Image (cartoon, helix red, strand yellow):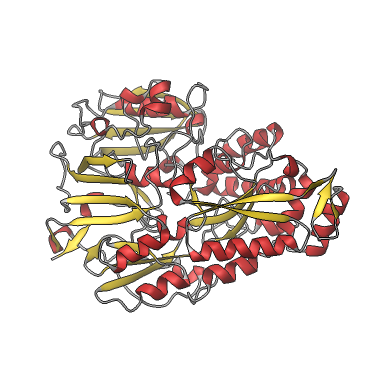
């Protein structure tokens, strides 16, 4: 698994809930309160399989069916991971509190121990586990996953090498159905690795990078469902029960993802065309709260909304300019817009590694000295040589300080936050132009860095935030779209990553993130927010569930 699965910022409201990271315990429609209280509960209408009806079609919407179907590849997004889960092995599952456990359909044994100062993990694979093409799922899948993601071969364009780069070897155990993974030293976050597996058929670097583009490769997958159809033009992918599956049968006849804009998505739910929708905004919640036969399910949301500055843009190469822009943004205004009408509050986020409701969390952004301060923002821009003109807009060498703000989709809350940001930055002499894009263009805008300022979001697939510190901050990480960071910082990050004790790594990581915040000014956390999902009342084992990732074959409709 990877922590960082990027989406357009407001799409976190709608999209981070469409994968299994949005499942939990009991249904309900009580009002939200605050992030700490919500972090103690989860709501998914949890039901045993014998309470579910066999059959039915489960449909949800996403802003796009990402062109890249390989979640390990650098261009993979949260949408990639959400789709991947429905037709590929999920080896490690998670309870709502983030406790990991092995899926017995794939693993009959999962042993972790320390030997000679090294972490050794033994994965014993279910002898029935087989890819759809007939190839056994064996130790070679673990080896392929490691080889592609460990960073030793630059031909692989990976989303992250975190964790995999610290593995010394992956070898066959007692037989082909056992993989023994030995780390170079002690490793703190073992449960975050090998959650997904790469089929060895995709190990060739060219296939890894390009083979999954607009091609799901169902034959390389495995699980209770398989791809029935994929329509790139209309943005639809459909899954049906997999006749080659060896475990409990999936409860559904079909699982469908539709690519829809925000407005079309909420209208589709109201019309009964889709079965669940994110409603963590005043406008969306108001449209569904009086509907019959639905649930409103809530939990805290392990996701981040953030603003990103493209430090490679000519007007943003100067650190003082980036610092001034972030210093001129009042995050409390953005939070009021985001949470208006939700009866919800939270502290302003101060870390990209942990959430305020997690042990070890610290407000590293505040510790770095950051705060909203328009006077200081103006001073910094003066010092950087950007002078205000008669129109109030700053200029330097005859060029105005103008930024293109890429905004994705038609969600009203997104639009309101963007307009508020434009207004705030105008006060310090920065001219911001909104560059509107349909949701289907998110991947292009993200991967090609078609922005100066961009609202992004990411969803955490597990609770091990510091395991993925490099994804966010390393200068050469493809997920570091701000283009900030240095080789010296990379070395410090690598040093922290080698700390084997989880608590000590968190302590040192907090210190380092404080330093990085104060020296880069490329990304600014704005909100976390609640997970609020409207679902059909009889939809079971799906909803708002913190870190929960369960068996997809157990999602269905009650009798």
State which quadrant residue 141 falls in: top left
The answer to whether residue 320 is left or right of residue 7 is right
Residue 368 in view (yes/no): no
The answer to whether residue 345 is left or right of residue 221 is right
Residue 10 in view (yes/no): yes
State the quadrant of the C terminus.
bottom left
Q: Which is nearer the eye, 178 or 451?
A: 451
The answer to whether residue 256 is left or right of residue 164 is left
The residue shown at (34%, 25%) is 202
Residue 317: percent from left, percent from top: 74, 40
The answer to whether residue 256 is left or right of residue 420 is left
Residue 174: percent from left, percent from top: 27, 24
Residue 96: percent from left, percent from top: 37, 58
The residue shown at (27%, 27%) is 138
Q: Which is nearer the eye, 172 or 394?
A: 394
Q: How many marks?
A: 0
Q: Which is nearer the eye, 136 or 459?
A: 459
State the quadrant of the N terminus.
top left
Q: Compared with residue 40, is residue 110 higher up or lower down, i.e. above or below?
A: above
State which quadrant residue 39 falls in: bottom left
Residue 147: percent from left, percent from top: 43, 24
Q: Compared with residue 551, is residue 298 higher up or lower down, i.e. above or below?
A: below
State which quadrant residue 525 falls in: bottom right
Q: Compared with residue 501, is residue 344 higher up or lower down, i.e. above or below?
A: below
């Amino acid at each position: 698994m990877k922590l960082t699965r990027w989406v357009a910022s407001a799409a976190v409201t709608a999209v981070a809930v469409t994968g299994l990271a949005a499942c939990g315990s009991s249904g309900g429609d009580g009002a939200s309160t605050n992030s700490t209280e919500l972090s103690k509960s989860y709501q998914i209408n949890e039901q045993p399989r014998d309470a579910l009806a066999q059959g039915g079609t489960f449909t949800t919407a996403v802003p796009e069916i990402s062109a890249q179907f390989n979640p390990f590849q650098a261009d993979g997004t949260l949408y990639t991971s959400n789709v991947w889960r429905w037709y590929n092995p999920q080896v490690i599952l998670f309870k709502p509190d983030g406790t990991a456990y092995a899926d017995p359909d794939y693993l009959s044994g999962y042993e972790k121990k320390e030997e000679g100062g090294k972490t050794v993990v033994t994965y014993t694979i279910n002898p029935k586990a087989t890819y759809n093409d007939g190839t056994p799922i064996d130790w070679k899948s673990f080896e392929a996953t490691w080889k592609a993601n460990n960073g030793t071969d630059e031909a692989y364009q990976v989303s992250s090498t975190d964790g995999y780069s610290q593995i010394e070897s992956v070898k066959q155990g007692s037989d082909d159905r056992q993989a023994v993974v030995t780390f170079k030293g002690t490793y703190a976050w073992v449960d975050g690795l090998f959650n997904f597996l790469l089929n060895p058929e995709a190990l060739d670097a060219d296939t890894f990078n390009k083979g999954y583009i607009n091609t799901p490769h169902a034959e390389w997958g495995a699980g209770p469902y398989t791809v029935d159809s994929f329509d790139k033009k209309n943005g639809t992918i459909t899954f049906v029960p997999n006749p080659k599956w060896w475990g409990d049968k999936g409860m559904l006849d079909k699982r469908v993802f539709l690519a829809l804009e925000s407005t079309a998505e909420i209208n589709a739910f109201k019309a009964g065309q889709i079965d669940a929708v994110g409603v963590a905004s005043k406008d969306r919640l108001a449209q569904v709260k009086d509907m019959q036969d639905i649930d409103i399910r809530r939990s805290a949301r392990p996701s981040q909304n953030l603003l990103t500055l493209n430090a490679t843009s000519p007007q943003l190469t100067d650190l003082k300019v980036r610092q001034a822009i972030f210093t001129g943004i009042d995050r409390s205004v953005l939070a009021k817009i985001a949470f208006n009408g939700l009866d919800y509050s939270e502290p302003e986020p101060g870390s990209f590694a942990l959430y305020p409701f997690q042990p070890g969390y610290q407000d590293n952004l505040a510790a770095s000295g950051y705060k909203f301060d328009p006077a200081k923002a103006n001073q910094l821009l003066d010092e950087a040589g950007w002078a205000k003109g008669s129109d109030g807009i700053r200029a330097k060498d005859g060029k105005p300080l103008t930024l293109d703000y890429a905004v994705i989709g038609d969600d009203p809350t997104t639009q309101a936050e963007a307009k508020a940001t434009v207004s705030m930055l105008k006060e310090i002499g920065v001219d911001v132009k909104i560059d509107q894009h349909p949701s289907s263009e998110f991947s292009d805008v993200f991967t090609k860095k078609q922005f100066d300022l961009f609202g992004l979001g990411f969803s955490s697939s597990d609770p091990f935030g510091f395991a993925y510190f490099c994804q966010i901050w390393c200068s050469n990480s493809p997920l570091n779209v701000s283009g900030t960071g240095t080789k010296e910082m990379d070395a410090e990050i690598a040093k922290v990553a080698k700390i084997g004790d989880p608590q000590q790594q968190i302590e040192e990581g907090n210190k380092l993130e404080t330093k990085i915040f104060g020296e880069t000014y490329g990304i600014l956390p704005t909100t976390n927010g609640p997970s609020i999902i409207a679902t059909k009342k009889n939809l079971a084992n799906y909803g708002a569930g913190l870190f929960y990732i369960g068996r997809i074959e157990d999602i269905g409709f009650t009798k």
